[in-house]
Image: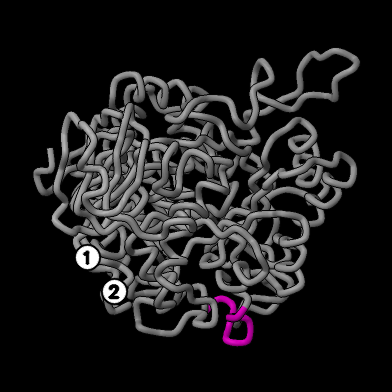
Amino acid sequence: MRFDLVLDNADILTMDPSRPRAGSVGIIGGQIAAVGERGELSGYEAATTLDLDGRFVTPGFNDAHNHMQAYGASLNEVAIDPTSVSSVEEIVAAVADAAASAPDGTWVIGAGYDHNKLAEGRHPNRHELDRVSPDNPVVLNHTSGHFATVNTSAMRLARVSEVEVPTGGVVDMGKDGTPSGLLEEQAQQLVRGLLHPRAIADMVLNLGAASDQYLREGVTSCQEAGVGGILGTAEPLELAAYQQAHRTGRLRVRVTLMASVDALHGGDHHEDDDEPFALDLGLHTGFGDDWLRFGPTKIFADGSLMGRTAAMFDDYEGEPGNNGYFQMPEDRLHGLILAAHRSGWQVATHAIGDRAVSSVLDAYAEALRQYPREDHRHRIEHCGMCRADDVARMAAMGVIPVPQARFISEIGDGMLDAIGPTRAGDCYRERSFLDAGITVPASSDRPVVNGAPLLGIHDLVNQKTMTDRPFNPDEALTVEEAVYAYTMGSARASFDETRKGSLEAGKLADLVVLDRDLTAVDPDGIAETGVLATMVGGRFEYDGIGLG
């Protein structure tokens, strides 16, 4: 045996139960050919042998729910996230600066504000934006993705006061009886439709910028939660952008694409076949290769917990009569799930409120009753509020929840305020799912929050908000369980467990080198861990220490 590369003298957390720890890895053709103890592979010929000097190694991290292209785009938009601004006044000042240098009539786009963290505790309004940008249309995208604030110029272009509000959306009205500029959920279509689709070249640049950042954080795979457009966007050529980015070397991490359900349609078919509900030529889950392939179809059931639009059984704290809403009639939601399931798709449905989660489980149960299928691995994206009896239902049906522990520290305070203290135990469960025998992947929903996996591992273990408030401590995971979620858990959620998620012979050589043993540090210090190098397919795509 002749290896292309041997990594020796390492401290490897393999995620392989038959060999939890190892000291060396031999790689051939971008795949792991052998795993051994320190020095065990030194007797074999190798083109290159690298001494890792005892450094800690894990499988590459896999973000099971992110918006990669949108994240890349946000890097070039006006920064109004909580690390950049702390008040509506500062947001207005940032818009003023951008508008002053923008050609007349061009859009000013801001990304990442969180009204819960602003000094005024509210969204900006169109009058404030009009004051500094009367001629340039402005759209400010909320960090959750479930709101946008626009100015009068943007409202005029979108004819907000003239056209019908899309089902599942709300145009907020101010005290003067006119639109305040805040668009909720599907109402964002009114404005975002003017900004999309993006040019393929621009999307390729976005994917390249995102790839670079992901590699610096140890991400080797991710799952794109809604290619083709979500919540008012429309990107009919987004797959072409991913393909071009891959072909030109700008897509440097492996991507599983979730096709937006809006991109699916029926088609001509033989009378012996069930009615297809798919992309053109019948494409569905599984098509592609190790770098770029289709996973589930993405469907939206409801809204946001921090924005108090997710569909709940009980009212939000301090808001009698508000228990959120679905983004479409439930019968249509159930019909889409049934059609997608029947056509062979793995189905990934966004459901955050407990009422939405329960409704989606009803739909999955009916789809499986009518069209039984083994190992479907249907998913509930976020699964933010989940009652105990629905945990048991998920386990019985083989449904995979996809929660975001990264929400805990960044937006956890807003979520706890929205639901009140008596329901906190149902919020973003982790331990309950594991104890029920359910696969738990890990993800960020980036760009909603900072998507660095090490921050996610920190939050999974520590369960504290940014104000040091306990979030849901009974749901805490151990470090090993948290790393497993970001590796094998995410791999299994996308049918990739035979190729990714652990460092063992026959799997892809995707790994990350860290500056400390995560299992040996104080839990409070996990977030301070540094990524030294990231390998994808046997090559160090990020190398911060000169490994070569």
| As drawn, 517 above or below 270 | below
Q: Residue furthest left?
A: 546
User: Magenta stretch mostly in which secondary structure?
Assistant: helix
Structure colour scheme: one colour
Label 1 with label 2: CB-CB less than 8 Å: yes
Q: Position of residue 215 (x, y in %)?
A: 27, 44
Task: Estimate the spatial distance between the alpha carbons at disc 1 and disc 2, rounded to whole Å.
Answer: 8 Å
In the image shown, does 205 or 451 lie closer to the viewer? Answer: 451
Amino acid type of the residue tagged 2 in the rendering: Ala
Residue at disc 2, secondary structure: helix
Q: Residue at x 49, y 61 (%)?
A: 404
Residue numbers of the magenta segment: 417-425
Query: In the picture provided, is 120 more to the left or to the right than 10?
Result: right
In the image shown, does 74 or 377 lie closer to the viewer? Answer: 377
Q: Residue at x 64, y 33 (%)?
A: 262
Residue 88 image-quadrant placement: bottom left
Q: Would you say residue 121 sits in the magenta stretch?
A: no
Q: Position of residue 389 (x, y in %)?
A: 76, 72
Q: Which residue is mark 1?
A: 516
Q: Residues within 10 Å of mark 2 (few under 14, many from 20)?
A: few
Q: Position of residue 51 (x, y in %)?
A: 14, 48
Which quadrant is home to the C terminus?
top left
In the image shown, does 164 or 380 lie closer to the viewer? Answer: 380
Amino acid type of the residue tagged 1 in the rendering: Arg
Query: In the picture provided, is 404 more to the left or to the right than 302?
Result: left
Q: Residue at x 36, y 29 (%)?
A: 203
Q: Which residue is mark 2?
A: 520
Residue at disc 1, secondary structure: loop
Which mark is on residue 37? none
Q: Position of residue 286 (x, y in %)?
A: 60, 30
Which quadrant is home to the N terminus?
top left
Can residue 441 be seen? yes
